[in-house]
Amino acid sequence: MKGIAKIKYLRTSYKKSKRICELVKGKSAKQALDILYFLPQKPAKFLYKAVKSACNSCAVKKGIKFEDLDLNNLLVKVCKVDKGPTWRILRPGFRGSPFIARRHTAHFTVIVEEVK
């Protein structure tokens, strides 16, 4: 079974999120959730929710509850972060000229697959 979770338009930087994504790629779902739970960075909380959602998706496809699912048998197959659109906000700047504040967004994709 395969579980997929996509979270789009997250208000976080693409580069900072990519570093955290590399930590959990190829690990078991239980190990990935433990790592992400204790990381202090903001993207780790988003990625924690994405991995948990992908595991829940796998449980729904199997027809069981999430609590009954063995997370040690699930492997984080794909964990990727893509760039989202950049918000441009005009703020007042020096001598009346506009200052463009950029707010970066990211898209997370997590695929969890069952290992036999």
Image (cartoon, helix red, strand yellow):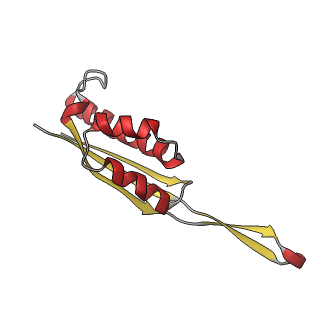
Residue at 79%, 75% (x, y): give it. Answer: 98
Q: Image height check: is 113 above or below 18?
A: above
Nearest to the observer: residue 19 or residue 108: 19
Nearest to the observer: residue 14 or residue 64: 14
Q: Image height check: is 105 above or below 99?
A: above
Left or right: 82 in relation to 62:
right
Whether residue 53 is visible, yes or no, is: no
Quadrant in which residue 12 is drawn:
bottom right
Left or right: 96 in relation to 49:
right
Nearest to the observer: residue 85 or residue 39: 39
Quadrant holding the C terminus: top left
Q: Image height check: is 105 above or below 56?
A: below
Q: How many marks?
A: 0
Instruction: Farthest residue to the left: give it.
Output: 116
Q: Image height check: is 82 above or below 94?
A: above
The percent position of residue 31, horizontal first and vertical second, equals 30, 36
Instruction: Farthest residue to the right: give it.
Output: 95
The percent position of residue 16, horizontal first and vertical second, equals 49, 58
Nearest to the observer: residue 98 or residue 16: 16
Residue at 76%, 73% (x, y): give it. Answer: 99
Whether residue 13 is visible, yes or no, is: yes
The percent position of residue 57, horizontal first and vertical second, equals 30, 37
Quadrant in which residue 50 is drawn:
top left
Quadrant holding the N terminus: top left
Residue at 38%, 39% (x, y): give it. Answer: 35
Left or right: 77 in relation to 84:
left
